[in-house]
Every structure is written in C-alpha cells, then in structure tokens.
Image (cartoon, rainbow, N blue to C red):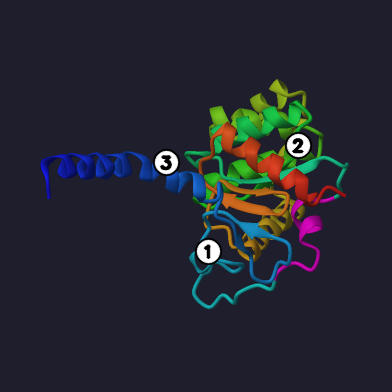
C-alpha cells in the first residue's frame, strides 16, 4: 500500500475511534427500561430483578405476590398529578439529596410526592421512621421528614419533646403514636410493598409506573417524570 493510502486509512481509523462512541450513544435508547414481571404496565430502570427481590428476603420468606392494584398500593388516592413515591431510610447516604429533589418538584407542582418510610438499616432507622409516621397523625410528616433527613434525632424523650415543640406537635401524642400498632403496621406494609416491587434498597423510587433505585440527578429525574407523564402513569 502506498504512503498516501496508509495516511488515508489511518485518518479514517482515527475518525472512527473518535466518532464511534458518539454514534453509539446517539443510536442507543436514552433509558434501558425492562418490563416488571407480574406488574403489567410497570417498567424498571437499573433494578435488574422483578418483584420479590431475593436480596430483601430473609431465610424462610416466600416471594410475595404483586399487589392487585399497584398504583393504589404505592401512591394512595391521586389528584391528577404524576405521583413519585420515595422509599427512604434516615441513615441512607443518598436519601437526603433524593428527598430534597422530590420535595422541590412537588413544590413546583410537577409531581405529587409520596413518602414511604422503609427502615432497612437497623433499630435507629426504625425509631426515626416511627417518629415521622407518628408526626403524620398530626399533619406534620413532611416537615419532620425533611428535618430528620438532615439533622437526625437524639434518642430519649427529651429530644422527642424538643422536636414536637419545634414543629408545634403534641409531644405526648407523638410519643404514644410512635409506639402504636398502627405505625408498626404501616412500616410492615411498606416493607412488604418494597419486596413486591423488587426494590433492592433505599432510596427506592417509583415514578408513576417506572421503578428505579439509588442516587439520581435532577436532570435525569425530570426526564423520567416527563416520559412517565406521557404514559399517564398512576395519575388517577
């Protein structure tokens, strides 16, 4: 081969090396969704497993059946906005940032935020989840949730009383509710639901009928919200 031919061939090869990654990116889908077995119309992004994720099951546990009405089970009654549910633990490293982002989109009216207290990191996590759910009985969940995500809570009745005063809550009622069977049942329901959806851990995120987990950027979440809004996911 002539020197000119070698130069042309080298230039073409270099152009391919530089341009191929961009070409591949342009021809690949933006998100690699997977259908969720047992949940018609639901899809997952980066979960890798369907309902009954084995990582969440203890010895002797059985794989739970998916909920009959997944939208109602995850989000409750709708208001026409796209719902986004976040399964959170107060000691989860990514949960504060994800919670802040979802709260901001909720304030903008872009979505309807739904909080699922899912304590997976031990007794301290469950103690804070109980306080947040107890605050919900007095209409204070959102504010207490945001506070606990960033500041936590010292153990003991004195710290609980300070928290109640901070958010204008009845401290005695808060303490009783935190230890109540009703709060225990709500935590148990969320644990079962997380298994049914196949969530691998916190933060678990349900964007309408799209399930994902872990850290997420604002741009990525907004794009997923826009895509899911086009599908009308769980807005009723």
Seen in the picture, residue 109 relative to 119 is either above or below; the reply is: above
Nearest the viewer among 178 and 152 is: 152
In the image, residue 171 lies in the stretch drawn in magenta: no
The residue labelled by disc 1 is 56
The residue at 61%/67% (across/down) is 51
Nearest the viewer among 172 and 121 is: 121
Query: First in sequence: mark 3 or mark 1?
Result: 3
The residue at 37%/45% (across/down) is 20
In the image, residue 72 lies in the stretch drawn in magenta: yes
Seen in the picture, residue 152 relative to 25 is either above or below; the reply is: above
Q: Is residue 22 left or right of residue 212?
A: left
| Residue 93 position within the rendered picture, expressed as x and y whole percent measured from the top left | 47, 39
The residue at 60%/74% (across/down) is 63
Disc number lying in front (3 or 2): 3
Which numbered tag is attached to residue 111?
A: 2
Query: First in sequence: mark 3 or mark 2?
Result: 3
Query: First in sequence: mark 2 or mark 1?
Result: 1
The residues tagged by marks 3 and 2 sit, at their Cα atoms, a distance apart of 33 Å
Residues shaded magenta: 66-76
Which quarter of the figure has residue 12?
top left
Which secondary structure lies at badge 2?
strand
Nearest the viewer among 12 and 27 is: 12
| Residue 9 position within the rendered picture, expressed as x and y whole percent measured from the top left | 22, 45
The residue labelled by disc 3 is 22
The residues tagged by marks 3 and 1 sit, at their Cα atoms, a distance apart of 38 Å
Nearest the viewer among 136 and 210 is: 210
Which numbered tag is attached to residue 26?
A: none
């Amino acid at each position: 081969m002539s020197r000119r031919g070698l130069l042309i061939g080298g230039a073409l090869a270099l152009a391919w090396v530089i341009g191929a990654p961009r070409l591949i990116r342009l021809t690949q889908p933006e998100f690699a969704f997977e259908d969720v077995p047992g949940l018609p119309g639901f899809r997952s992004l980066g979960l890798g497993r369907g309902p009954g994720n084995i990582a969440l099951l203890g010895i002797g546990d059985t794989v739970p059946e998916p909920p009959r009405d997944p939208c109602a089970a995850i989000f409750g009654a709708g208001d026409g906005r796209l719902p986004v549910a976040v399964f959170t633990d107060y000691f989860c490293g990514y949960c504060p940032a994800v919670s802040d982002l979802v709260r901001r989109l909720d304030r903008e009216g872009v979505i309807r935020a739904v909080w699922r207290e899912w304590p997976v990191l031990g007794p301290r996590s469950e103690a804070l989840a109980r306080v947040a759910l107890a605050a919900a009985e007095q209409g204070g969940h959102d504010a207490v949730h945001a506070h606990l995500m960033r500041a936590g809570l010292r153990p003991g009745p004195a710290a609980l009383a300070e928290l109640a005063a901070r958010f204008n809550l009845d401290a005695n009622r808060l303490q009783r509710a935190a230890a109540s069977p009703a709060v225990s049942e709500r935590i148990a329901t969320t644990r079962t639901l997380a298994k049914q959806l196949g969530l691998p851990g916190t933060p678990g995120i349900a964007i309408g009928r799209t399930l994902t987990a872990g850290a997420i950027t604002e741009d990525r979440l907004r794009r997923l919200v826009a895509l899911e809004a086009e599908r009308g996911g769980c807005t009723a």
